[in-house]
Image (cartoon, rainbow, N blue to C red):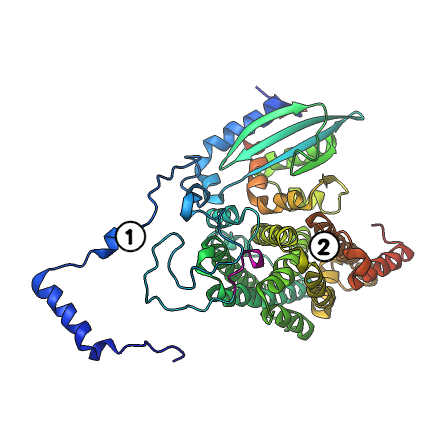
């Protein structure tokens, strides 16, 4: 056990005596009723929406005035509560606002809660009855689902492991990160369920994919994790989900990908708004972010080109393994792959990092891939 | 009586259907986005701006041109493609796998998504199921072209 209470209460005579005294006499302390905290009257800005975190952005309870460096609270005391002597130091790793804050953080959380769905009951699984995909397509679909389950398991672990490290004053971000972990767990669930309903079972894990994913899990700072996970990895996965929806062989797969892309796009939205926030409020971090991106782009390039993924896409896009199927599959998959990179740089540009293209090796890969595609007669 | 497409009346009719199916849209969750729909008719475009808030289509307006800085994204395409999509929805009760928005627009070959800000563009995908089910309400309308 990593933390032991500083007192053994079951053997502390004074503590036990006070407990028994209260039972015996009913005499109360009531000092907590004199807390010198602010009295406010929050109201729903829009009754259709309900009482949101934004409606609570008032006075000492609000998030607008959280200082850049939170020094006053290192405990689990809720922001705005009176903090008496004796609360333990929860030792948060992240107590600097620009390390995790995003514009509109609170609305991303409200949206996440409102748009939760259920992989067991919201997918029309019954429509798969009688659906038999050709062996090659069925196995390719299962390989895609195997790959994505692998992705989503680390995508669940990564935000979850940062939760206890975030200062409790950042309750809106903590709530969003908790909701994200739930989203990713549901994605792992839905992809596993779909893999196992293809009739081919799971296919093969991907070493390159897992190497890329381990990078996300082992980030040294929250910002590094967010750049790698929310902005780079999930940005790529969002494009991948849209492509997968486009290629989906059944209406059931279409619905799965439409629902997962909603969650993924929300995570990317947080990532973009966080990235913008860091650049605006912590400009000296620009170089550090470039360094994070150097590494994140390297692994995302590798992950996106993993054989276990690319070949599944080529088969699904081409419809089989005949020469003409493969030609068609390579054409469409290349278009997707380049689109994925292009959208990544569009996001960075809009976030306030237009110079990224000049430095990025991924951008060099994009230009190389684009030239190769044009030479191969692939229309972009 | 058939509602003409493209027209403000068509989107107003979808708005009324959305309100009538409130439980379904509540289940899908908040939808907060403003986007444009541009329909090419004989070389000209008819443009509409749809403002969604909470669970509702709050406002529809026809405009001479869509300012991409004032909308999250715009879905544009020739009236023949829109007609094919709406007729498909009417036949099936919802878009089939070849006629949903993402499929029609994915590589910009049939419908095209245009945007100024990629964050706005991503809102199409953040609210994808709601937007799809909104257009799927066309199955409840009689539409003329």
Q: What element carries label 1?
A: loop
Instruction: State the extent of the magenta-drawn residues as a range.
Output: A94-100
Queried whether the magenta region covers residue A34, the answer comes back as: no
Q: Is residue B50 above or below residue A90?
A: above
Q: Does residue B144 lie above or below A317 as drawn? A: above
Quarter of the figure that contains the N terminus of chain A: bottom left
Q: Which residue is drawn at 45% across and 69% down?
A: A91
Residue topped by disc 1: A35
Q: Which residue is drawn at 41% across and 79% down?
A: A2
Q: x, y (%) of residue A311?
A: 74, 66
Q: Which chain carries label 1?
A: A
Q: Is mark 2 on a helix, strand or loop?
A: helix
Task: Give residue A159's position: percent from left, percent from top.
Answer: 53, 63
Q: Residue A344 carries which label?
A: 2
A98 is within the stretch colored magenta: yes
Instruction: Note whether A331 is above or below B16 in the view shown.
Output: below
In this view, which residue lies farthest toward the left? Answer: A24
User: In the image shown, does A200 or A353 lie closer to the viewer?
Assistant: A353
Decide which of A48, B11 is in the foreground and name it: A48
Q: Residues within 10 Å of mark 2 (few under 14, many from 20)?
A: many
Question: Could you tell me which chain the residue with mark 2 belongs to?
Answer: A
Would you say residue B30 is visible in this rendering?
A: yes
């Amino acid at each position: 056990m990593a933390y032991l209470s500083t007192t053994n209460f079951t053997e502390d005579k004074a503590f036990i005596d006070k407990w028994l005294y209260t039972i015996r006499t009913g005499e109360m302390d009531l000092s907590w009723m004199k807390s010198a905290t602010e009295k406010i009257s929050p109201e729903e800005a829009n009754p259709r929406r309900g009482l949101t975190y934004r409606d609570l952005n008032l006075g000492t309870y609000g998030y607008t005035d959280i200082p850049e460096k939170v020094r006053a609270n290192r405990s689990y005391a809720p922001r705005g509560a009176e903090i008496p002597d004796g609360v333990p130091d929860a030792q948060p790793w992240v107590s600097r606002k620009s390390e995790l804050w995003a514009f509109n953080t609170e609305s991303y959380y409200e949206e996440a809660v409102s748009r939760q769905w259920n992989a067991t009951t919201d997918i029309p699984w019954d429509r798969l009855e009688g659906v038999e995909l050709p062996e090659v397509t069925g196995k390719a679909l299962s390989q895609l689902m195997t790959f994505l389950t692998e992705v989503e398991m680390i995508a669940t672990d990564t935000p979850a492991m940062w939760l206890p490290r975030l200062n409790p004053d950042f309750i809106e971000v903590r709530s969003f990160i908790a909701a994200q972990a739930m989203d990713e767990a549901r994605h792992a669930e839905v992809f596993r369920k779909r893999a196992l309903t293809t009739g081919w079972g799971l296919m093969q894990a991907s070493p390159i994919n897992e190497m890329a994913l381990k990078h996300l899990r082992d980030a040294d700072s929250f910002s590094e994790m967010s750049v790698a996970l929310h902005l780079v990895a999930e940005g790529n996965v969002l494009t991948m989900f849209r492509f997968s929806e486009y290629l989906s062989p059944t209406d059931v797969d279409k619905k799965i990908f439409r629902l997962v892309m909603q969650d993924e796009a929300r995570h990317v939205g947080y990532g973009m708004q966080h990235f913008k926030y860091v650049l605006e409020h912590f400009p000296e971090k620009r170089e550090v972010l470039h360094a994070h991106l150097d590494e994140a782009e390297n692994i995302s390039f590798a992950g996106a080109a993993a054989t276990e993924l690319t070949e599944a896409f080529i088969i699904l896009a081409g419809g089989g393994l005949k020469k003409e199927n493969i030609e068609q599959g390579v054409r469409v998959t290349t278009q997707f792959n380049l689109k994925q990179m292009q959208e990544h740089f569009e996001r960075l540009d809009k976030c306030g990092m237009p110079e990224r293209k000049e430095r990025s090796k991924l951008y060099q890969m994009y230009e190389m891939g684009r030239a190769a595609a044009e030479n191969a007669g692939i229309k972009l | 009586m058939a509602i003409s497409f493209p027209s403000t009346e068509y989107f107003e009719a979808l708005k009324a259907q959305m309100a009538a199916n409130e439980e379904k849209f509540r289940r899908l969750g908040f939808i907060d986005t403003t986007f444009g729909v541009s329909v090419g008719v004989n070389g000209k475009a008819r443009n509409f701006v749809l403002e969604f808030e909470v669970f509702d289509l709050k406002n529809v307006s026809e405009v001479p041109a869509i300012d991409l800085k004032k909308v999250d994204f715009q879905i544009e395409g020739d009236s023949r493609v829109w007609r094919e999509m709406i007729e498909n929805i009417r036949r099936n009760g919802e878009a089939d796998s070849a006629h949903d928005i993402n499929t029609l627009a994915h590589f910009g070959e049939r419908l095209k998504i245009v945007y100024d800000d990629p964050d706005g563009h991503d809102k199409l995908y953040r609210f994808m199921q709601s937007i799809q089910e909104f257009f799927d309400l066309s199955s409840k309308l009689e539409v003329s072209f």
